Image: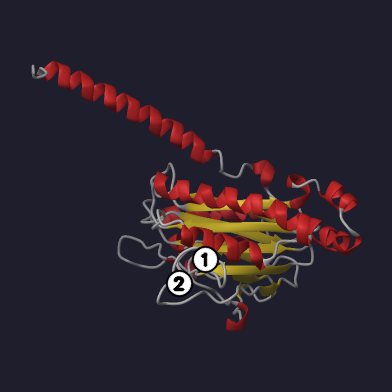
């Protein structure tokens, strides 16, 4: 059998590289289809929301945000009209809230971004059924997603998540799976406010342990996950700011190893607390990158302000 010449091998390698670059471009476009555009920012009276995920490599990573403005996404008027009487009030209450998911998949690459997009689709599809049958998002949705990820043996990356819903009164109810806890900056006291531990209950990372009673695989030695419970935080005053974030923010350090979080973050919030949520985010982003322009991890920050 005739061996290929060096020029033929080089041509084949170039062809392969061209193909892989094309596939990477297609995959990048697919992943970025799940990025939240400005039109998806939730609209709730007296609440201002803005946030972004900043991939470490500048292209794609494991951090992800999903905004859920129920009125925009799910034709709530139609659902309310067609719902049985027992669900109408729940649907009306849900329509007045907005949901926010902040997700952190292990890794800083397209593989992590792909897993985040799988969660994205599973979550939004599940919301449709939750609204139809329960009139609201329940913990059952997250039990099912958790076990689905546990049963998917090909997924080995860890995944943390926080999902919360904000009302116009400033009540934030949330569920956490091993995710960093929310922060509240008090406008009245001009500082980050302490939050009681019993309002910050968290659970194992998504997919590491099955939810009770619905696993397709053998239950691990660690057992099953306890049922999710929901925490509640109240933003009582005008100008209070709630911050959701990923551990890229808590781990952000300068060249000498100095920590950005929480002292410097608090000072930026204090200096910019009168600004809209988007401007507060932009000031945090600029200050964070001035502190260290090359973060070691993806970073996500979502600012929720009571106006």
Structure colour scheme = secondary structure
Using the image as rendered, state which of residue 270 and residue 36 is in the foreground. 36
Are discs 2 and 1 less than 8 Å apart at CB? yes
What kind of element bears circle 2?
loop
Say above or below: 192 vs 95. Answer: below
- Quadrant assignment for the C terminus: bottom right
Using the image as rendered, state which of residue 299 and residue 148 is in the foreground. 148
Horizontal arrangement in the rendering, residue 276 relative to residue 117 (left or right): right
In which image quadrant can residue 8 be found?
A: top left
Horizontal arrangement in the rendering, residue 136 relative to residue 36 (left or right): right
Residue 267 position in % (x across, y down): 53, 67
What kind of element bears circle 1?
loop
Q: Which mark is residue 258?
A: none
Residue 47 position in % (x across, y down): 74, 58
Q: Is residue 51 visible?
A: no
Horizontal arrangement in the rendering, residue 123 relative to residue 42 (left or right): left
Residue on which disc 1 sits: 215
The residue carrying pointer 1 sits among few (fewer than 14), some (14 to 19) or many (20 or more) residues within 10 Å by Cα, namely some
Which residue is found at the position 39% from the left and 47% from the top? 109
Using the image as rendered, state which of residue 11 and residue 86 is in the foreground. 86
Say above or below: 138 vs 278. Answer: below
Using the image as rendered, state which of residue 160 and residue 123 is in the foreground. 123
Which residue is found at the position 38% from the left and 54% from the top? 107
In which image quadrant can residue 123 be found?
A: bottom right
Q: Which mark is residue 219?
A: 2
- Quadrant assignment for the N terminus: top left
Residue 144 position in % (x across, y down): 59, 62
């Amino acid at each position: 059998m005739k061996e290929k010449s060096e020029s033929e091998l080089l041509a084949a390698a170039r062809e392969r590289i061209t193909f892989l670059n094309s596939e990477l471009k297609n995959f990048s476009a697919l992943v970025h289809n799940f990025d939240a555009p400005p039109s998806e920012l939730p609209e709730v009276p007296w609440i201002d929301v803005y946030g972004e995920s900043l991939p470490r490599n500048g292209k794609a990573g494991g951090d992800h945000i999903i905004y859920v403005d129920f009125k925009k996404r799910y034709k709530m008027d139609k659902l309310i009209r067609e719902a049985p009487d027992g669900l109408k009030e729940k649907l009306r209450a849900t329509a007045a809230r907005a949901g926010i998911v902040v997700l952190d998949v292990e890794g800083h690459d397209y593989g992590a971004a792909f897993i985040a997009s799988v969660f994205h689709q599973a979550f939004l599809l599940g919301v449709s059924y939750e609204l139809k049958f329960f009139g609201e998002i329940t913990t059952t949705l997250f039990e099912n997603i958790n076990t689905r990820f546990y049963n998917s043996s090909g997924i080995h990356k860890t995944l943390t998540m926080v999902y919360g819903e904000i009302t116009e009164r400033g009540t934030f109810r949330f569920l956490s799976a091993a995710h960093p806890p929310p922060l509240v900056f008090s406008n009245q006291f001009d500082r980050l406010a302490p939050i009681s531990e019993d309002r910050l209950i968290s659970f194992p990372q998504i997919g590491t342990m099955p939810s009770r009673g619905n696993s397709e695989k053998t239950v691990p030695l660690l057992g099953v996950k306890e049922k999710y419970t929901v925490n509640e935080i109240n933003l009582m005053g005008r100008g209070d700011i709630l911050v959701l974030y990923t551990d890229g923010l808590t781990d952000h350090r300068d060249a000498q190893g100095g920590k950005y979080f929480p002292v410097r973050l608090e000072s930026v919030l204090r200096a910019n607390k009168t600004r809209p949520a988007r401007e507060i985010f932009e000031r945090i982003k600029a200050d964070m990158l001035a502190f260290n322009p090359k973060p070691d991890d993806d970073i996500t920050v979502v600012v929720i302000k009571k106006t």
